[in-house]
Image (tube, rainbow, N blue to C red):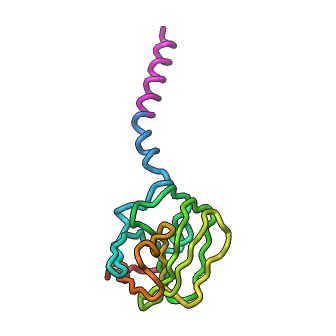
Amino acid sequence: MDSSFRIVRSIYFYIILLVTLLPAFLSCSTHSPVSNKNTYEIKINDKISRAEVAFTQKGRTIGLMFRDKLDNDHGMLFIFPHEKNLSFWMKNTKIPLSIAFINSKEVITQIDSMTPYSLMSHTSKEKVKYALEMEQGWFRKNGIKVGSKVGLSPEIRNLKTE
């Protein structure tokens, strides 16, 4: 009798543990869309979008890899400490993306389309400080072209980059 009581108590304990921890495990997915709490508003021409900002080496390295989708009008802005020729690829990135390279004057100098999982490098032709990744075709659909002015908020400009 004592041993069956221990088994029941043990099973009960594991069920309670599972019910308690399951929500925490489910919320830790790396396959989530861009999070609203880490996003900033970006204005290009008359179009307003939101972008998660990658301003640390780790954030820029991971980028949008492993994501299943992006919310409408959401993307990722990569910020670098100073202007240089930037190069991006799509290793481990599931979502077809377009990338806009943006100089320190916040003007788009180049827009490229990128294919999921491709190891092909997309390198800026000019030195730039920013790169904005959005769902593939987003720039074209919104009439945004090379030469378009990007409006970055003071909060974005004041982020301390690594």
- The magenta stretch spans residue 14: yes
- From the top left corner, tell me how far across and down residue 111 is, in percent: 52, 80
- From the top left corner, tell me how far across and down residue 149 is, in percent: 39, 86
Query: Residue at the spot x=63%, y=65% of the render?
Result: 91
Residues 66 and 118: in front is: 118
Residue 152 falls in image quadrant: bottom left
Query: Residue at the spot x=43%, y=79% of the render?
Result: 144
Residues 28 and 74: in front is: 74
Residue 89 falls in image quadrant: bottom right
Query: Residue at the spot x=57%, y=59% of the render?
Result: 94
Side (left or right) of 67 relative to 119? left
- From the top left corner, tell me how far across and down residue 159 is, in percent: 39, 79
Query: Residue at the spot x=39%, y=37% of the render?
Result: 20
- From the top left corner, tell me how far across and down residue 72 is, in percent: 39, 62
- The magenta stretch spans residue 105: no
- The secondary structure making up most of the magenta span is helix
Number of marks in the rendered image: 0
Say if 9 sits above or below 148 in the image. above
Residue closest to the far right:
119
Residue closest to the far top:
1
Side (left or right) of 158 relative to 100? left
Say if 26 sits above or below 70 in the image. above
Residue 127 falls in image quadrant: bottom right
Magenta span covers which residues? 1-18
Say if 123 sits above or below 13 in the image. below
